[in-house]
Amino acid sequence: MVEENQAILKGVGLTKVFGLGHRKTIAVDHVDVEFREGEVSSIVGESGSGKTTLAKMLLGLINPTEGEIYFQGKRLDLRTYKKKKEYWTNIQAIFQDPYSSYNIFNKIDTLLLDCIRMRGGHRLPHARKVEMMTEACSFVNLKYEELTNKYPFELSGGQMQRLMIARIFLLKPKILVADEPTSMIDACSRATILDMLMKLRDEVGMTIIFITHDIGLAYYVSDSVYIMAHGKIVESGSADDVILHPKAEYTRRLINDVPKIHEAWDLSTVDYSEI
Amino acid sequence: MGKIMLEVNELTTKYITRFGENVYAVDHVSLKVEEGKSLGIAGESGCGKSTLALSLMGYYFAPLHYTSGEIIIDGQKITGMDPDDIRRKILGKEIAYIPQAAMNALNPTLKIIHFIEDVIHAHDPKATKKEIYELARERFAILGLPEEVLQKYPVELSGGMKQRTVIATSVILSPKVLIADEPSSALDVTSQKMVIKMLKDLMEKGFVKAMIFITHELPLLYNVTDDIMVMYAGQIVEKGTAREVVFDPLHPYSKGLMGAIIVPESGVRNVKLTAIPGTPPNLKNPPSGCRFADRCKYVQPECKVRSIDFRDVGNGRAYRCIFSEEQLRKAYQNG
């Protein structure tokens, strides 16, 4: 057997329960996940399947009710803020809504300079900082000279989301969690964002956890895929295996729900049972 | 050839901004939709798709203003009619509109049946509650919506269900033309499929005679509509049947759009997606020549100077480019 890359992030028996008693909701139910270094892994599921809750637990934003997270083979301990802060130098996130990801009072310049400062670059000469920011902007096909003095509201949604990736490029975390980064964006800019995520993987060697409800996007970017339904992982494996030869009934349904162009799209399977 | 349900000739509408500038967001658009057919409109955000949808209803409110052109619904010219008449006689009855986040229009303190009563009373004040309930129940049953929904509050329903309820409500008077402006883009794929199925059912069962479907999701458009028009910077740049436009696009912009399609099919991973660089031009002062010239790979000096005609090449196919069909196809083959 070929030796596989080591798992950089691992979740064992992760469970999250919201509420108490008869109002109890099990959002994530004993999930085991493993993300290998330098790969794009997708978590795919409908709304309400628990994929965002899982991501938040992996990010250390909420505490799991049960289960453990292992980062680089060591059990993660996030009991103090100091430890969390240290963990967050290794893991970063991009969220769904680019419009609410920015501090509207800060110029783009300030945002990028903050990233450099966070990586201990505050003593660098200004020319070097500008060079770094220019490099980050050109990584995402933006021009730094045009952006320096702008505020976030002057940019389009696609540009904002690309700038978020530029930020990640400066911070260079080991893991990036991208939670539906393309769902608020035009279909045409979507390809650009996905290509940039793949570029981060190929050129920076980042491990990317990509969360989406569109199995087509997951298939395009990822190396391995986890299919999630009602808080459980129903199927996992390499992208080709899962999407071209799905085993679980649920995966087949998800694939069926996405419109296709080379194959016929079967509309007769719609069931109206949901209220 | 069927009866023409909606005919639009050289429609131009503009926005007047706070500073008195004119922005022509719909610029000499002509289209025809036959009975039983659906027309799709594709384009990036900021291309004027939604403004076109609003303009088609013939009911204008500031900052949107009517400039020229005509709209004919089933032989009846609605441009130039009194706005009050349009609101009472045309909207809802002849032409219905579903906006993008239609579900947000539901007042959370009222039951669903109340909205249906509202729609019907606006057109027929004498209708009794019992008649309306019967009509709604019947219609909901045909469209696969459970009857209990009528007595529920909007907050008790899921997003997909709300969207379907709104669609059923807006077509309760069986309008001739339905305009659906991104009806499914706020939903996940499963609810999206239900909405699409419902729109198809409406067409098949004859509750609406013709449909205009607007979205930027091309695979969806391909599966739903018969014809596709591609819109760029307020103008129509290409039209043809869905199959022609998706598999054999002529205009470089349409070609660019087709290059960004992502579907879960085996070939996708090997194909390098190509996105169009740049953003659509600002329509306050649109470029004088071809509006796509700045972003076009095949741009010629001539493109930026003279305005380009919308060239008809027969069989309902037309496009707006200086190159001939053969030249374009050859250019695409060579990459």
Image: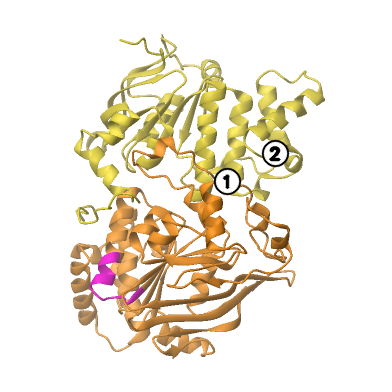
Chain colours: A yellow, B orange
Which residue is rendered at x = 61% and y = 47% of the image? B277
Residue labelled with disc 2: A108
Q: Chain of mark 2?
A: A
Q: Are marks 1 and 2 on the same chain?
A: yes
Does the image show residue B177?
yes
Which residue is rendered at x = 70% and y = 45% of the image? A151
Residue labelled with disc 1: A158
Q: Nearer the viewer, residue B168 or B55?
A: B55
Q: Chain of mark 1?
A: A
Image height check: is B98 above or below A183?
below
In what element is the residue under mark 1? helix
Which residue is rendered at x = 39% and y = 86% of the image? B74
The stretch in magenta equals B200-210
Question: Few, some or many C-alpha atoms within 10 Å of disc 1 (few <14, some 14-19, many ≥20)?
Answer: many
Does the image show residue B45?
no
Image height check: is A118 above or below A166?
above
Q: Which mark is residue A207?
A: none
Quarter location, residue B328: bottom right
Amino acid type assigned to the residue bearing label 1 in the image? Gly
The quadrant of the image that shows the N terminus of chain A is top left
In what element is the residue under mark 2? helix
Where residue B285 sits in the image (x, y, percent)?
72, 65
Where residue A274 sits in the image (x, y, percent)?
23, 52
Where residue B274 sits in the image (x, y, percent)?
53, 44
Image height check: is B34 above or below B48?
below
Q: Is residue B208 magenta?
A: yes
Judge left or right: residue B20 versus residue A7: right
Query: What's the CA distance linking mark 1 and mark 2?
Result: 15 Å
Amino acid type assigned to the residue bearing label 2 in the image? Ile
Mark 1, mark 2: which one is toward the viewer? 1
